[in-house]
Amino acid sequence: TGGQIGFLGLGHMGAPMAANLVRAGYDVLAFDPVPAAQEQARKDGATVVETAVAAATDRDVVITMLPNGKLVLDVYADLLPAANPGTLFIDCSTIDVADAKEAAARTVAAGHRALDAPVSGGVAGAAAGTLTFMVGGAAADFADALPVLEVMGGKVVHCGDAGVGQAAKICNNMLLGISMIGLSEALVLGEKLGLSHQSFFDVVSTASGQSWALTSYCPVPGPVPTSPANNDYQPGFATALMTKDLGLAANALRANGIDGQLGALAAEIYTRFNQTDAGKDFSAIVTDIRNRSEQ
Ligand code: NAD
């Protein structure tokens, strides 16, 4: 795999990811339909092209960072016939596992190679080049993609076959959503029972109820000074994004016949909160639980 990259989707995540590839010396053809995104990519040193197809023509690697799975499938329908045989398509968007498998199957059927490689780490991780990549696809393709992914990421894990990168992403975020709700219910119950946030933290952070949500991302101000709760719940990881990921997880639970009651409920709880507080950090769910409780 050489250094010719096509990059589609220059939004909050894609723009800094593409910029890091340019900085590392890759030749990047970039496409996004939004003029402001094109302008930023030009400033970052990418060659901005006028169509999606142009960004995928004569490239070794084509990276997509798009809002949803339907769009990925639509864009792939245009790109697959236009790309050189054997082009390595890497989709970094967070999408349905079923869509990721479909995209990979169509890519391979068209004579190309496919990886799903969703990320965690947010905009800050994208800018710093420290994203975690969760990758699904063939081992040989993963090996070829590794140098490119390591430019944008700090940790790159090959999780399994096509779609399994997306599986890792939604399993992690489903657990995170459930654990943030569970932690928040316990904190609000503790408040009512006279347990201070600091005492709760001092006990639970080293007891069996310990979690990343508590020790790194505490949803109330005080015990963990760097958490978004101390900054008026500015994200961080926005409720809108958590709601999206929980929706994908709930779809996957249903599609695979899993009795995932808490995952489905977490999706409902965040969907409701998202109607009023989409832009707040997802840890603000603790305020919703408090507000909805008897005062
Ligand atoms: P975004 O909406 O900021 O960016 C998406 C970009 O895709 C937009 O600039 C849009 O104009 C562009 N686009 C739409 N149609 C296109 C097309 N046909 N061709 C090329 N570009 C097109 O979204 P984002 O925050 O950058 O997220 C991108 C993906 O990464 C999503 O799947 C999201 O779930 C995932 N993700 C986001 C974060 C985060 O913190 N923002 C973290 C992890 C994963």
Image: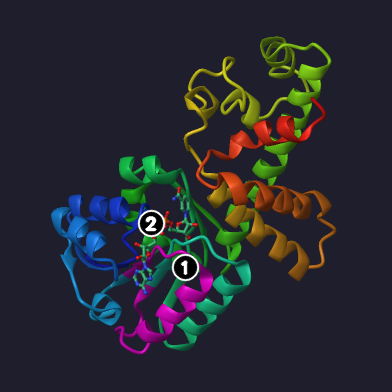
User: Is label 2 or label 1 in front?
Assistant: 1
> At label 1, which amino acid type do we have?
Leu
Residue situated furthest front in the rendering: 295
Local SS, label 2: helix
Q: Which residue is pictured at 37% across the width and 40% down the height? A: 124
Q: CA distance from mark 2 to mark 1?
A: 11 Å
Local SS, label 1: strand
What residue range appears in magenta?
A: 62-88
* Quarter of the rendering occupied by the C terminus: top right
Quadrant of the displayed image that contains ligand 1:
bottom left
Tell me which corner region of the image, top left, top right, bottom left or bottom right, holds residue 291.
top right
x%, y% of residue 99?
57, 73
- The foreground one among 238 and 93 is 238
Left or right: 70, with 34 as reference point: right
Tell me which corner region of the image, top left, top right, bottom left or bottom right, holds residue 39.
bottom left
Residue 82 lies in the magenta-colored region: yes
Residue 20 lies in the magenta-colored region: no
Q: Which residue is pictured at 19% across the width and 73% down the height? A: 49
Residue 40 visible in the picture: yes
Q: Is residue 217 above or below residue 136?
A: above
Which residue, given by chain and number where applicable, does mark 1 sit on? 115
Left or right: 50, with 182 as reference point: left
> At label 2, which amino acid type do we have?
Leu
Badge 2, how many Cα within 10 Å: few under 14, some, many 20+?
some
x%, y% of residue 86?
36, 80
Which residue, given by chain and number where applicable, does mark 2 sit on? 146
x%, y% of residue 34?
28, 66
- The foreground one among 82 and 66 is 66
